[in-house]
Amino acid sequence: MKLMYACYSFTSAMKLLASLLLLFSIPYTASSQEQNEQIWFIASELPSFHYKGGSSLNESFMLYIQDSLRLPAPNCQGKVLVSFVVEKDSTISQVNIRQGLDNCPGYEREVKRLLLTMPQWVPGKNGDEIVRVSMSMPISFQSKP
């Protein structure tokens, strides 16, 4: 009777192992909705932003920041690194501070205000498909002369 139990346990274990192997060997295919919602870090055509005749993304972004930044306190000086997503509809979402200012209370709120109220971007593309793209940009906090 003990031998039969051991054979049964061994057989059950082998079936379980075979089932697990089969489960993990089936490739996961994301649904079309999940693929449409994917955020890209690299795209064949990155998003672009045009503001007041800036000749590049960086220049246009800098001009917008210079025109729109409100210092939360007079002693706010330094650079903030921010990441965000340029959506398919040309808006900004998911604003995250990657590197901030320790001596400047209120800077996070100002960075989010700046980005969420920006004029529209031209969204990124992969081939002919418009995609969501993650971007990172520096924002300089400095007193205007």
Image (spheres, rainbow, N blue to C red):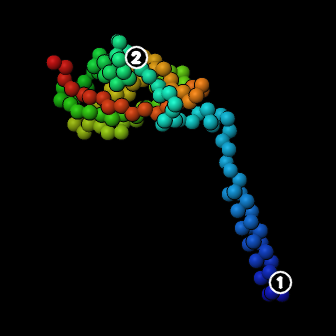
Query: What x and y, as percent, mark residue 79?
Result: 26, 33
Is residue 54 rendered to the left or right of residue 77? right
**Residue projecting furthest to the top:** 52
Above or below, 5 against 89 in this view is below
User: Amino acid under label 1?
Assistant: Met
Q: Quadrant of residue 114?
A: top left
Q: Quadrant of the C terminus?
A: top left
Q: Which of the marked residues, 2 or 1, is nearer the chain's N terminus?
A: 1
Query: What x and y, as percent, mark residue 29?
Result: 68, 44
Is residue 73 rendered to the left or right of residue 112? left
Helix, strand or loop at label 1? It is: helix
Query: What x and y, as percent, mark residue 26?
Result: 71, 53
Q: Residues within 10 Å of mark 2 (few under 14, many from 20)?
A: some
**Residue positioned 20% across, 31% down in the render:** 77
Above or below, 28 against 137 in this view is below
Q: Pointers 2 and 1 in contact (CB under 8 A)? A: no
**Any mark on residue 41, and which?**
none
Residue placed under numbered mark 2 in the picture: 50
Q: Nearer the viewer, residue 46 or 107?
A: 46
For the residues labelled 2 and 1, the Cα–Cα distance comes to 76 Å
Residue placed under numbered mark 1 in the picture: 4
